[in-house]
Amino acid sequence: MVLTLEPAMSFAPGKQMVHEENIVITEDGASLLSLRASPVLPVIR
């Protein structure tokens, strides 16, 4: 099974943060399919 997590947050008028992670679940456990985000996210203006 593959799960997609897409958290989003509005933190100011017209400003929003969105991130996506894809995770595969197998009989042996879970693994990330996507790269982890950097601890410092860029601001796109």
Image (tube, helix red, strand yellow):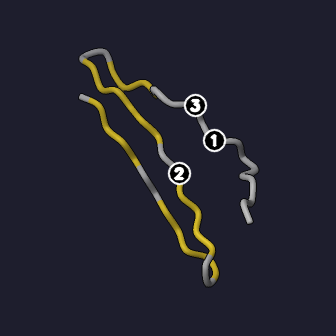
- Where is residue 43 shown, x and y percent of the image? 74, 60
Q: Which residue does the numbered mark 1 point to in the structure image?
A: 37
Tell me: 26 left or right of 41: left
Is there a contact, CB below 8 Å, between mark 3 and mark 1? yes
Is 24 drawn above or below residue 44 in the view shown?
A: above
Q: CA distance from mark 3 to mark 2?
A: 11 Å
Q: CA distance from mark 2 to mark 1?
A: 8 Å
Q: Which residue does the numbered mark 2 point to in the structure image?
A: 19
Q: Secondary structure at mark 3?
A: loop
Q: Secondary structure at mark 1?
A: loop
Q: Which amino acid lies under the numbered mark 3 shown in the image of this protein?
A: Leu
The residue positioned 53% from the left and 68% from the top of the image is 9
- Where is residue 32 shown, x and y percent of the image? 46, 28
Q: Which amino acid lies under the numbered mark 2 shown in the image of this protein?
A: His
Is 23 drawn above or below residue 44 in the view shown?
A: above
Badge 2 local density, few (<14 within 10 Å), some, or many (20+)?
Answer: few
Is 41 drawn above or below residue 22 in the view shown?
A: below
Q: Quadrant for the C terminus, please.
A: bottom right
- Where is residue 26 shown, x and y percent of the image? 27, 20
Q: Which amino acid lies under the numbered mark 1 shown in the image of this protein?
A: Ala
Q: CA distance from mark 3 to mark 1?
A: 6 Å
Q: Which residue does the numbered mark 3 point to in the structure image?
A: 35
The residue positioned 57% from the left and 31% from the top of the image is 35
Is there a contact, CB below 8 Å, between mark 2 and mark 1? yes
Tell me: 19 left or right of 6: right
The residue positioned 76% from the left and 50% from the top of the image is 40
